[in-house]
Image (cartoon, grey):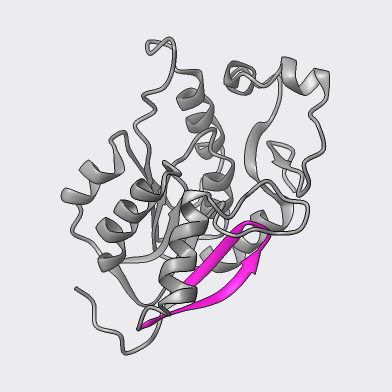
Amino acid sequence: MPRRVILRRSDTTPETDVYRLLRHPLFAWLGIRPVAGQHTRDEHEALKRWAAGKSSLVEIGVAEGASAVALREVMSPDGTLSLVDPFHLSRVRSVNAMKRAAHRVVNSCPNGRVSWIAKLSSVAAREWNRPIDFLFIDGDHSERAVQQDWEDWHPFVVPGGIVVFHDAAVFPGGWTGKDWGPVRLVDRLFRDAALPDWSIVQEVDSLVVVKRLQGAETS
């Protein structure tokens, strides 16, 4: 595991005082600490497994860039990773330490190309016109917002392509609940309704990976 990334524990062990002190993304931007991911080590490895060799990747919700750099490390050298995040929650927009931390760590990996899309995902989707073979949905976690991301972006996913939802499953000792937006959406689409042309292919902690079946028609 690269020292530039620190990952979340799979349980709900309380944070240490030192971590709470250094939690602000300013410390990641300045290189005082590695960027902090909101996913676990096992989720990190699953992301890398499914993104390996992909050529058109989209991540919705970048934060400090821990998952984005993992995707860039394993994607096709000829591929493009598009990172969608407005980074609009910074208290000091002229500094925007989270955005700077993300750029710092993602740019530390030279593999492939990166396109930064500093817009709301719904706005970015209206301007999108390219096929996608890997989509990671990890933005606004309200059920309505996750559904909107799914509806806006999944038509671009090619047959055989992958969509990954974060915080979308309840697991022993974990932090998610049955009422979480991504959990409710994934349950409704892929468990209760068993959406045609899509299948769950892996679940790791809170991560749910679905695949567009070969032969499925794209919109």
Q: Position of residue 40 (x, y in %)?
A: 70, 49
Q: Residue at x 41, y 70 (%)?
A: 189
Foreground residue, 4 or 38?
Answer: 38
User: Does residue 34 appear to the left or right of 160 in the view shown?
Assistant: right
Foreground residue, 178 or 124?
Answer: 178
Q: Position of residue 170 (x, y in %)?
A: 64, 58
Residue 71 visible somewhere in the drawing: yes
Q: Position of residue 108 (x, y in %)?
A: 56, 37
Q: Residue at x 45, y 56 (%)?
A: 136
Q: Quadrant of residue 216?
A: bottom left
Instruction: Work out whether 181 lies above or below 6.
Output: below
Q: Residue at x 46, y 75 (%)?
A: 192
Q: Residue at x 70, y 59 (%)?
A: 171
Residue 52 visible somewhere in the drawing: no
Q: Main secondary structure of the magenta part?
A: strand
Q: How many marks?
A: 0
Instruction: Work out whether 154 lies above or below 120.
Output: below
Instruction: Work out whether 146 lies above or below 106.
Output: below
Foreground residue, 144 or 160?
Answer: 144
Outermost residue on the front side: it is 179
Range of residues picked out in magenta: 197-210
Query: Is 204 covered by the magenta stretch?
Result: yes
Q: Quadrant of the C terminus?
A: bottom left
Q: Position of residue 135 (x, y in %)?
A: 41, 60
User: Does residue 194 appear to the left or right of 104 in the view shown?
Assistant: left
Q: Quadrant of residue 15?
A: top right
